[in-house]
Amino acid sequence: MNRSHLILAGTLGLLLSVGAAAAPSQAITASGNFHPLPHAAFQPSKTATYKVVFGMTKPSAKPDQVNPALERVARTVNLYVSAGVPLDHLKFVAIAYGPATALVLDNAHYHAQFGVDNPNLPVIAQLHKAGITVAVCGQAVAEHHYQNAWVAKDAEVALSALTTITELQQQGYALMPL
């Protein structure tokens, strides 16, 4: 290699390493895309613990799309992680109820109802792996004539959304209605 090739290769290597180092962290890859804004105001503290209960009430516009509320939960996780907050500092609970109840159905029962695979399952699985609790209102499960056994393995059946939200708020969780 001649000198110009070495300089070009070195410059390209430097640019690639800088680009890789600047890439945002994303804990949830199945959903939750965001725009990194490292210099924006109100950045999360890397040392604080965040407690949020997300009330997921709206259905997807189309059954083959990730529920928009679940997508926002994933985005919230990714925003905090990209700001340097460790996953174990995120005490998040996302509870589905009302028209959003079906988002937690296992694939067989979701497919039976909507004719497509459940697009929410990869997101729920990644949230679960990241330590985020996804739950469903047990009252809504019963009212929709579902069985608890139909709920995805990575989701929990709660007594109710009403008791879950109020109980968690009593423990200092902020409510984020979606």
Image (cartoon, helix red, strand yellow):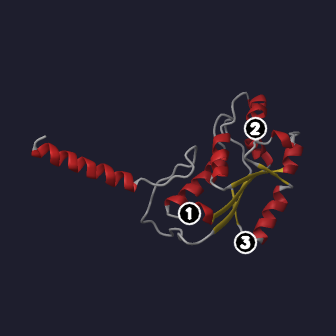
Q: Is residue 18 left or right of residue 93?
A: left
> How far across and down, in percent of the image, does residue 85 sit?
54, 64
In depth, the one of 99 and 119 nearer the eye is: 119
> How far across and down, in percent of the image, does residue 171 sit?
76, 71
Q: Which of marks 3 and 2 is in front?
A: 2
> Alpha-carbon distance for marks 1 and 3?
19 Å
> Alpha-carbon distance for marks 3 and 2?
31 Å
In contact (CB < 8 Å): disc 2 and disc 1: no
Q: Which of marks 2 and 1 is nearer the N terminus?
A: 1
Q: Which amino acid does label 1 sit on?
A: Pro
Q: Name the residue under label 3.
A: 172
Q: Nearer the viewer, mark 2 or mark 1?
A: 1
> Alpha-carbon distance for marks 2 and 1?
29 Å
* Quadrant holding the N terminus: top left
Q: Mark 2 points at which residue?
A: 106
Q: Which disc is residue 86 wearing? A: 1
Q: Nearer the viewer, mark 1 or mark 3?
A: 1
In depth, the one of 138 and 178 nearer the eye is: 138
> How far across and down, in percent of the image, does residue 43 sit?
50, 68
Q: In this view, does 87 lie to the left or right of 6?
A: right
At a point 81% along the width and 66% down the height, the residue shown is 167
Q: Earlier in the sequence, mark 3 or mark 2?
A: 2
